[in-house]
């Protein structure tokens, strides 16, 4: 396993924690993959003590499992965990999208438009990793909306609660029509935010984040 980063920048447990957490959440480190302390130390360019501290924090977050024999794996997400993530994310995303509709600027709208354009180009080009790549853009779109809401506390909560692995899990089941429908939903969300229509924005996001297969798990 090789982490794409500059080891010289990683000189503490906090840096290791933040990087590993991000790589788990964005799917770079897959659910169930084994993590070896020696490899992590080499990849991150730090000693075992800060690596172990970072892993303990990740374990407390529920992102890695550490066995009594020091076997370490990225936590696998089961149906129950997926449902919990979905429920929390749905509530938070609906709220912040409403805030974003009120607080957005032209620059904010342009940044969201750029992400939707990237989604459209990705679908037009096709990709062997379409679900994962589209999930990344979807995540970036909603993270940007949370930033536009301009509430640092809510942004922090969302970034802790929303797991891009949920998106990848859902999108692994998508057919071409599902991706096209998702793109159109993003356009509707964008249009509502651009027109500062809070009610329309909340309605559009509520439709977009609704996944009955998870809600009924």
Image: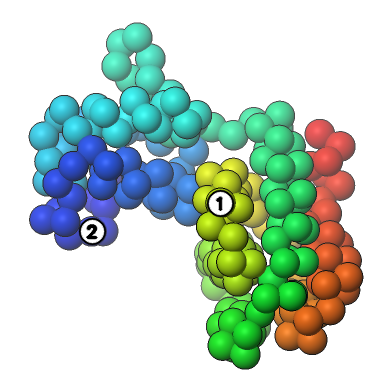
Residue in the image at 27% along x and 42% along y: 14
Q: Position of residue 21 (x, y in %)?
A: 40, 44
Residue wearing tag 1: 153
Residue in the image at 72% along x and 67% along y: 99
User: In the rendered image, is residue 62 in sight?
Assistant: yes
User: In the rendered image, is residue 180 in sight?
Assistant: no
Residue in the image at 74% along x and 37% along y: 83
Q: Which mark's residue is nearer the viewer, 2 or 1?
A: 1
- Colour mapping used in the image: rainbow
* Quarter that holds the N terminus: top left
Q: Does 87 appear above or below 131? A: above
> Which of the pair 127/66 is nearer the observer?
66
Residue in the image at 42% along x and 26% along y: 59
Q: Secondary structure at mark 2?
A: loop
* Quarter that holds the C terminus: top right
- Residue 66 in the figure: left or right of residue 164: left
Q: Residues within 10 Å of mark 1 (few under 14, many from 20)?
A: few
- Residue 58 in the figure: left or right of residue 172: left
Q: Does 120 appear above or below 86? A: below
Residue wearing tag 2: 5
**Residue 166 tag number:** none
First in sequence: mark 2 or mark 1?
Answer: 2
Q: Secondary structure at mark 1?
A: helix
Q: Does 131 appear above or below 157? A: below
């Amino acid at each position: 396993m090789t982490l794409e980063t500059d080891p010289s920048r990683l000189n503490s447990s906090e840096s290791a924690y933040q990087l590993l957490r991000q790589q788990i959440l964005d799917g770079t480190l897959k659910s169930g993959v084994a993590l070896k302390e020696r490899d992590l130390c080499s990849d991150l360019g730090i000693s075992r003590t800060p690596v172990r501290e970072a892993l303990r924090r990740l374990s407390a977050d529920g992102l890695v499992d550490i066995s009594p024999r020091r076997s370490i794996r990225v936590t696998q997400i089961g149906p129950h965990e997926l449902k919990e993530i979905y429920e929390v994310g749905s509530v938070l995303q609906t709220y912040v999208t409403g805030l974003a509709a009120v607080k957005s600027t032209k620059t904010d709208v342009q940044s969201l438009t750029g992400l939707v354009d990237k989604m459209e180009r990705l679908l037009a080009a096709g990709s062997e990793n379409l679900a994962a790549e589209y999930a990344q853009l979807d995540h970036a779109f909603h993270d940007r909306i949370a930033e536009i809401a301009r509430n640092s506390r809510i942004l922090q909560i969302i970034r802790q609660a929303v797991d891009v692995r949920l998106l990848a899990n859902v999108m692994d089941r998508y057919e071409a029509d599902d991706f096209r429908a998702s793109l159109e939903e993003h356009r509707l969300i964008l249009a509502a935010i651009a027109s500062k229509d809070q009610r329309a924005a909340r309605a559009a996001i509520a439709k977009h984040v609704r996944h009955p297969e998870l809600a009924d798990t």
